[in-house]
Amino acid sequence: MRQIDLLAQTDSLRQLGRDFATLRTTVQKLEVRPGTDAPLRLGPQILAINELVSRTLAQLTDLHGSQYTAVPGSRYTLQSLSSIVSTASLAASGLATTLYANPPDAAGFGYEPPAEEAARQAVTALAGFLSDAARQLDRCAATCQSAAAGIIRNLKNHPEQQPALPDLTPAQYGVLRKVAEGGARRYVRGRGRGIVVRAADGTPLRPAAFGTLAKHRMVSVDALVSPVVGQEITVTAAGELALYMQPTAHARPAVAPVAPVAPVAPVQEPPSRPHR
């Protein structure tokens, strides 16, 4: 039985869910008109979905056969990941069908009434394929977050399976709890005066305590954003579990639960071809 970092897997699942949500938004905004530019519009999105499927399969492989399978309730998470692979693959198939259904000779549409009607029917069909793909991606995003929440819930319910976490001081717990309650941001002070971390309500957080939390990967900083405008800080799976295990019971944070999503793969309906 392989030993893996379950908390790192949980954080990766959450990021995977955010990436599915971002891709869903991109697909929702696509406007594919009958014509030859469809490969340019759809090709990158098909490749992006397949990349997310690959990442999902990697996580499923890591969890399968690891110590996590000994945790009661782990089967739900594994089934959820399998359903994501199936659902995302259907989304990629839907975009591929959109590409196939796109009339390559659309440049001739509009010269004759029958051709105009064919163009309208093609537009309707293409919009339906894109809508279905976006809906599948939305389900993938929700299932990722539900599966991640399931891992944390399993570890909370079975202390014997919880990974070892470093001891924190009351000040460090206080900073961690403040981030968990409403988030925080990290900024660069002007004229080279260093970094400042503030909670969502504007309260400054102790730099030393924050540094310890970051060192132990209990908080995550969005490094893709410049600290000049403020980098978002969130609590990781390790931080969430540390708060739950905090010796003082009253100090546990009010973290909104994530409703589970049934890991049932959708049934793919045969695509309709536009009239040519």
Image: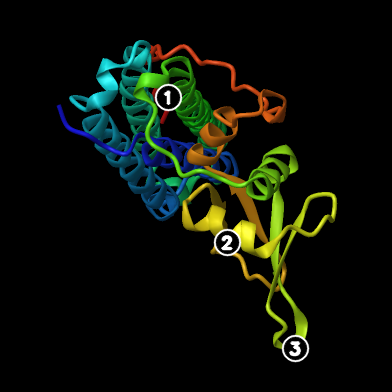
Q: Pick the residue in front: 126 or 104.
A: 126
Q: How many marks?
A: 3
The image shows residue 172, relative to residue 96, as above or below, that is below
Q: Which residue is mark 3?
A: 191
Q: Pick the residue in front: 182 or 104.
A: 182
Q: Which residue is mark 2?
A: 211
Residue at the (26%, 37%) spot, across then down: 4
Residue 49 spot, x, y in % from top left: 37, 41
Cα–Cα span, label 3 and label 2: 21 Å
Pointer 3 and pointer 2: residues touching (CB < 8 Å)? no
Residue at the (58%, 42%) spot, across then down: 25
Residue 201 spot, x, y in % from top left: 85, 50
Pointer 1 and pointer 3: residues touching (CB < 8 Å)? no
Q: Which of marks 1 and 2 precedes in the sequence? A: 1
Horizontal arrangement in the rendering, residue 212 relative to residue 264 (left or right)? right
> Quarter-wise, where is residue 242 in the image?
top right
Circle 3 Cα neighbour tier, 10 Å, few/some/many (<14 / 14–19 / ≥20): few
Quarter of the picture holding the N terminus: top left
Q: Amino acid at mark 1?
A: Ile
Q: Amino acid at mark 3?
A: Arg
